[in-house]
Amino acid sequence: MPFKHAASMPVLHNEEEEDNSQSSSARQAPSVARTESTVCFSDLSGSDDDSSSAASSSAAGPKVAPHVGHKKVLVTGGAGFVGSHVAEYLLNRGDDVVIVDEINDYYDVKIKMANLDHLRKVCPDQSRLSIYKGDICDEQFMLDVFERERPEWVCHMAARAGVRPSIQDPFIYIHS
């Protein structure tokens, strides 16, 4: 069953457009906007034929053209196996990457540090690769990263590995 395409909202917006009571000098840059998902699973049709989805997608609004060109991407879990490979791919194609990872000790931290060292060798330019050690569940930390780095895209790769340990200590899996 194909998903209907939905227009996505920007991550950053200018609060002056919404609230004219602040002076323009009070806010130098747009702030992080909290947005909701643009895909609603309850709206998905059970039909797989293209004619019904084409008719319903025109009612939902225009499709967003694929983004081409330079991107600044926040990769959560960028020190792990999958996240570091995603980050390397993005860097090799010319995008800027911001990595956020708590670098937990589920497996040897030296492996994660080696992944980050490899990325730094792939891209020694610190203006193209930023690395932050922190918890993605820490709201203030993440707001600071978004305000400082202003990523346009997020690739969420952060996750706790391992099924068996989730039985022994489920809270750390719920938290992450």
Image: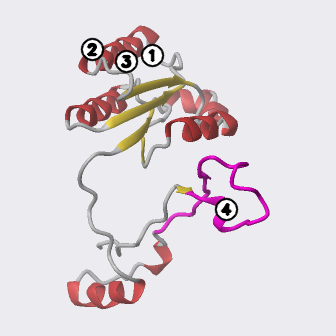
Tell whether label 4 touches label 3 (CB within 8 Å). no
33 with respect to 48 (left or right): right
As for residue 15 lying within the magenta part, the answer is yes
Q: Which label's residue is closer to the chain start, 1 or 3?
A: 1
Please provide percent x and percent y for residue 48.
25, 80
Spatial CA span between label 1 and label 3: 15 Å
Measure how far apart labels 3 and 2 are at the Cα level: 9 Å
Distance, label 1 to label 2, CA atoms, is 23 Å
**Spatial separation of the CA atoms under disc 1 and disc 4:** 46 Å
Q: Which residue is drawn at 43% across and 26% down?
A: 130
Q: Is mark 4 on a helix, strand or loop?
A: helix
Which is more N-terminal, label 2 or label 3? 3
Q: Which mark is residue 16?
A: 4
* Number of the front mark, 1 or 3: 3
147 left or right, relative to 8? right
Q: What element carries label 2?
A: helix
Q: Which of marks 3 and 4 is nearer the N terminus?
A: 4
Question: What's the residue type where badge 4 is placed?
Answer: Glu
Q: In this view, does 52 lie above or below 86?
A: below
Which of the two marks, 3 or 2, is nearer to us in this view?
Answer: 2
Q: Residue 116 carries which label?
A: 3
Q: Spatial distance from mark 3 to mark 4, Cα to Cα?
A: 39 Å
Q: Give the range drawn in magenta.
A: 13-38
